Amino acid sequence: MYRQICALWKVLSQQAVVPYAGTLDNPIQIAMVYPSADTSDFWARNYLAMTKRLDQLGIEYETTEFASRQVEHSLQSTYANQVVQDADLYDYVIFGPSELQIQADNIDKMAGSDGFGAARG
């Protein structure tokens, strides 16, 4: 999974846009768990940057957003558990913890899951 994240990050962060020349049977599935009602617009800006770059690259994708407020730690934990349970539905997960220390177990759970990207082989 770490290699997949690094590969996605490399593609998304390249300066020059080189359209994806490969083919995908289905759009890439991305689960996003983050505090959308945060006081800053950090997550909104990152989402827009990611989707714009994927569009520029010609990579088809679908995102499923699991949004919470910054103080809704238990809701975010519920979302994290749902994503792990449905790991075979997602190729990538972007997890913005509401509070790093509180969400550490969920981060470990997602990092240890073998399911993400399993549908792609």
Image: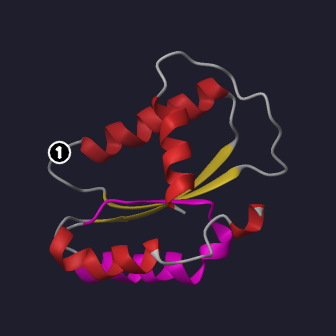
Image point 43% across, 36% down: which residue?
A: 48
Q: Is residue 48 magenta?
A: no
For residue 87, above or below residue 95: below
Image quarter in which the N terminus is found: bottom right
Q: Residue flagged by tag 1: what amino acid is it?
A: Ser
Image quarter in which the C terminus is found: bottom right
- Give the overall secondary structure of the magenta segment: helix
Horizontal arrangement in the rendering, residue 63 relative to residue 107 (left or right): right
Image point 20% across, 54% down: which residue?
A: 38
Q: Position of residue 18 (x, y in %)?
A: 64, 19
For residue 19, above or below residue 120: above
Image point 62% across, 65% down: which residue?
A: 90
Q: Which residues are magenta?
A: 73-97
Mark 1 Cα shell of 10 Å, populated few (<14), some (14-19), many (≥20): few
Horizontal arrangement in the rendering, residue 101 relative to residue 49 (left or right): left
> Does dot 1 land on a helix, a strand or a loop?
loop
* Quarter location, residue 44: top left
Residue at the disc numbered 1 = 40
Q: How is the image coloured?
A: secondary structure
Q: Position of residue 65 (x, y in %)?
A: 47, 60
Image point 68% across, 36% down: which residue?
A: 59
For residue 108, above or below residue 29: below
Horizontal arrangement in the rendering, residue 36 relative to residue 24 (left or right): left
Residue sitting nearer the eye, 89 or 36: 89
Q: Position of residue 118 (x, y in %)?
A: 71, 69
Q: Position of residue 17 (x, y in %)?
A: 58, 18
Residue sitting nearer the eye, 25 or 117: 117
Q: Is residue 87 magenta?
A: yes
The residue most toward the front is 3
